[in-house]
Amino acid sequence: MIIAMLFWGVSWTVGKIAAEHSYAEVAAFWRYAISFITLIPVIWFLKTPLKTDKKGFLYMLGAGLLTSVFNYLFFAGLSHGAAGYGGTMVTSLSPILTYLMSIAILGTKVSTRQVAALSIGIFGALVLLRVPFEGFGFLSVESSYFLGCAVVWALVTILSQKAASRADPMFYTLVVFGVAGFTNMMFALPYHPFDFAAYDNVFWMAIIFIGVVPGTFSTTLYFVSAGKIGAHRTGVFMFIVPIGAIVSSVIAYQEAVALSTIIGCALAFAAVVLFNMKKSKQK
């Protein structure tokens, strides 16, 4: 699980490299196209059941379409902003937004302690967005893309939860990768994504790495590990992602890490731990 999270963190820095050597639309398409193709042998090896019902398919279709939006925002944001900040912001905000959406949309009931946890998380999100220091100055091109990523990924998470009992997680991932890759391809066609010579070796090495290692390899590790440690505990491990994103971005781009980023991430981490601790006790 730790290895999977670290690779997901590194994908933010490698994604920035890919974005600098191509168009966001092209990088978005190839990322999940490669993941989809390389996940097929894993599905076959694990003998994953390829079945679901009508509702499960609709959930997967919706998650795939939303993932294509996330994918574009991911590369568009990295073409403008810092990889370390993006990886930290999206990973920290998504769980908080997921809890809030679950309460508002699904009517999820929360305890007093969970309300306190969400309050801490919201404050952490405001610190991450630098609202206490810059007001609404966070609404820059850089932050807007990453904020969009966090919102979209929270919606994807909710759909994933709805589909969990209707399809094997690996089959779910395969369909989501396929739908996302096909959707992103439609928007990439004007940029000639199949003209391989139009993009340099740096792009191809970066996008193959993202598609195979953080995509197929880490996704497989994530689901295998989740089955062993319990799905309710996997959310805590997501906060290893910023470590990989920050360290790799400092090495590759010498990016400075703002104190507000560290504090906001720590507060969001504390909120998720507190929220899940109470939830697991109730079980």
Image (cartoon, rainbow, N blue to C red):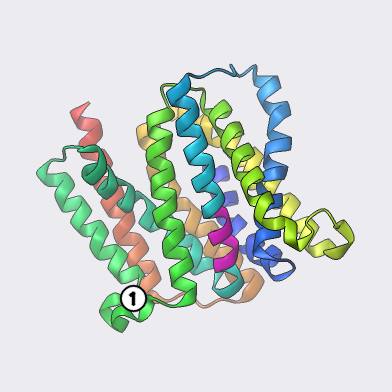
Q: Could you say which is closer to the camera, residue 235 or residue 110?
A: 110
User: Residue 226: x and y, percent?
Assistant: 46, 31
Residue density around tag 1, few if under 14, some if 14–19, many if 20 or more, within 10 Å: some
Q: Residue at x 74, y 56 (%)?
A: 189
The quadrant where residue 36 appears: top right
Can residue 230 be seen here? The reply is no
In magenta stretch: residue 75: yes
The quadrant where residue 187 appears: bottom right
Q: Residue at x 35, y 49 (%)?
A: 95
User: Residue 250: x and y, percent?
Assistant: 58, 71
Q: Residue at x 69, y 50 (%)?
A: 185
What predominant SS class does the magenta segment belong to?
helix
Span highlighted in magenta in the image: 71-77
- Decide if residue 181 is on the left or right side of residue 67: right
Does 227 sit above or below residue 210?
above
Q: Which residue is mark 1?
A: 130
Q: Could you say which is closer to the camera, residue 123 or residue 3?
A: 123
User: Residue 13: x and y, percent?
Assistant: 62, 63
The quadrant where residue 280 appears: top left
Can residue 155 be seen here? The reply is yes
Q: Quadrant of the C terminus?
A: top left
